[in-house]
Image (cartoon, rainbow, N blue to C red):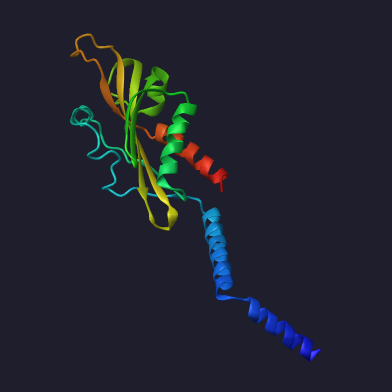
Amino acid sequence: MLAVRKLFAFLLVATWSPGTLASVSAVSGLRSQGAGAAANPIRSCTPRSDEVPGKNKTSTSRNKKHSEIPATKPACIEIHQPALLVQEFSQRIVGDLQWKVVDEQATEDFWNFSIAISADELVAYTKPSKELRVSWTAGKASVNVETVDLSGGYTRVLISAKFDAYGNQEDSLAPQRKSWPLPSNGALEAKLVGAISEHFKSVH
């Protein structure tokens, strides 16, 4: 029996090469990383004060147009996926929602698009001032989706929106205007973040 055990030990050592050991270690490492990613694929986050989606990336005229709108904190989420994949899926969501995109511009880490919205959607997505006496007829939302690469394979996603509102003034003596800039109440951003979150939870 002792001789058989010695023979088995010899064969085990002879066949266990450094290459085999490295391969097993690599597989174990990948399994550990995969388990960690699956355990926490989505993380909530709070944007820093300097994280303004679209900063220095939109046109000067557009910045001036929205300069009087109070800044609102963007929706923030961190996903254990590459930034490019997140951007591609964000664009697919907008298509699935059948939003009417009227203009857009994009880079590898930033996407700005505008959509036409109804009067009901305008009321649902914005915070009009109580001082405004306007009967809203339609609007346009300007949405920024910005991605930031993080350590550990995560991507931070920042989504913000601003709105132009169109309507008829109830006060006939007030100065006439074609549109009013309105701040977001966060509902549109939450809608996009929710769809992105649900998708990437399901793929883990």
Left/right of residue 131 with respect to residue 158 in the rendered view = left
Residue drawn 24% across the image and 15% down it: 178
Return the residue nearer the eye: 53 or 169: 53
On the image, the x and y values in percent for residue 31 come to: 57, 61
User: Could you say which quadrant of the image residue 141 lies in?
Assistant: top left
Give the answer, above or below, for where 31 lies relative to 160.
below
Residue drawn 41% across the image and 49% down it: 155
On the image, the x and y values in percent for residue 86 come to: 44, 42
On the image, the x and y values in percent for residue 54 come to: 28, 38
On the image, the x and y values in percent for residue 195 come to: 49, 36
Return the residue nearer the eye: 203 or 127: 203
Return the residue nearer the eye: 183 or 57: 57
Residue drawn 44% across the image and 54% down it: 153
Return the residue nearer the eye: 84 or 102: 84
Residue furthest to the bottom in view is 2
Give the answer, above or below, for where 69 lies relative to 7.
above
Left/right of residue 162 with respect to residue 96 in the rendered view = left
In this rendering, the count of numbered labels is: 0
Q: Is residue 77 visible to the viewer in this orientation of the structure?
A: no
Quadrant for the N terminus, please: bottom right
Residue furthest to the top in view is 172
Q: Is residue 10 visible to the viewer in this orientation of the structure?
A: yes
